[in-house]
Image: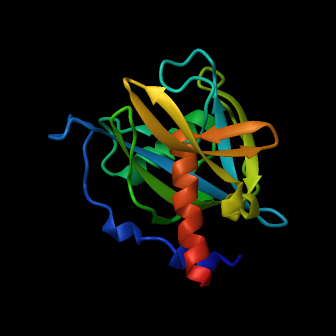
Amino acid sequence: MKRQHIIQSLEPLTGISDWTHNERDDGLTNAAVLIPLVKRNEWHILLTKRTDHLHHHPGQVSFPGGRADAIDVSPLNTALRETTEEIGIDKHLIELVGVIEPYLTVTDFCVVPIVGFVDSNFELKIDEFEVAEVFEVPLSTVLNMAEYKRKEIFWKGKNRLYWELMYNGYQIWGATAAMLYAFAERLTNMKN
């Protein structure tokens, strides 16, 4: 898949509105993640597995990213800062190219997924308190819509549906799988 095809499937960065780390009127907390694409023999998406002792989403697969801090003036700042803090990739090695629709989590976060191309010569410096490991999933796997399974969980008094994508023993589910699914839909719909 060509870079231009990926870029054309996204919303432009200019559409991102200002935001703040302060509490929102709707009770949600602003957050942003990076969907990091690395070109190998084909495109890969870089993911992290969170450590088991974290308060939020322990042991889960996620994108680099997190909640907005006081120093962040936009989701772009948050995604780049968190990526550097969590896995050590310098922002100068990341070309931000667009966004997909914000994702509202059941834990009351409004997450802005930002897509960026990462220079393949990056070196990881993992924050071992937060990140247990980093791995890559081929974009071809993410684009195979048949690989996603719809699952159900009883949580906080309700049955909730979520997406799950298994890859090499990694369970990618919840918000991360939902954002990957939305990204994959955009890329595959552009082909048609």
User: Compared with residue 67, is residue 167 higher up or lower down, i.e. above or below?
Assistant: below
In the figure, is residue 10 to the left or right of 69?
Answer: right
* Residue sticking out furthest to the right: 41
Q: Residue at x 45, y 62 (%)?
A: 100
Q: Residue at x 27, y 38 (%)?
A: 28
Instruction: Indicate the position of residue 13 as horizontal and vertical percent values.
Output: 40, 67
User: Compared with residue 11, is residue 27 higher up or lower down, i.e. above or below?
Assistant: above
* Residue 130 shows up from this direction: yes
* Residue sticking out furthest to the left: 25
In the picture, which quadrant includes the C terminus? bottom right
Relative depth, front residue between 13 and 189: 189
In the picture, which quadrant includes the N terminus? bottom right
Relative depth, front residue between 150 and 28: 150
Instruction: Indicate the position of residue 172 as horizontal and vertical percent values.
Output: 65, 41
* Residue sticking out furthest to the bottom: 192
Relative depth, front residue between 95 and 22: 22
Instruction: Indicate the position of residue 58 as horizontal and vertical percent values.
Output: 57, 23
* Residue 123 shows up from this direction: no
In the figure, is residue 28 to the left or right of 32?
Answer: left
Q: Residue at x 64, y 76 (%)?
A: 3
Total label count?
0
User: Compared with residue 102, is residue 87 higher up or lower down, i.e. above or below?
Assistant: above
In the figure, is residue 11 to the left or right of 166?
Answer: left
Q: Residue at x 56, y 77 (%)?
A: 189
Instruction: Indicate the position of residue 122 as horizontal and vertical percent values.
Output: 72, 50
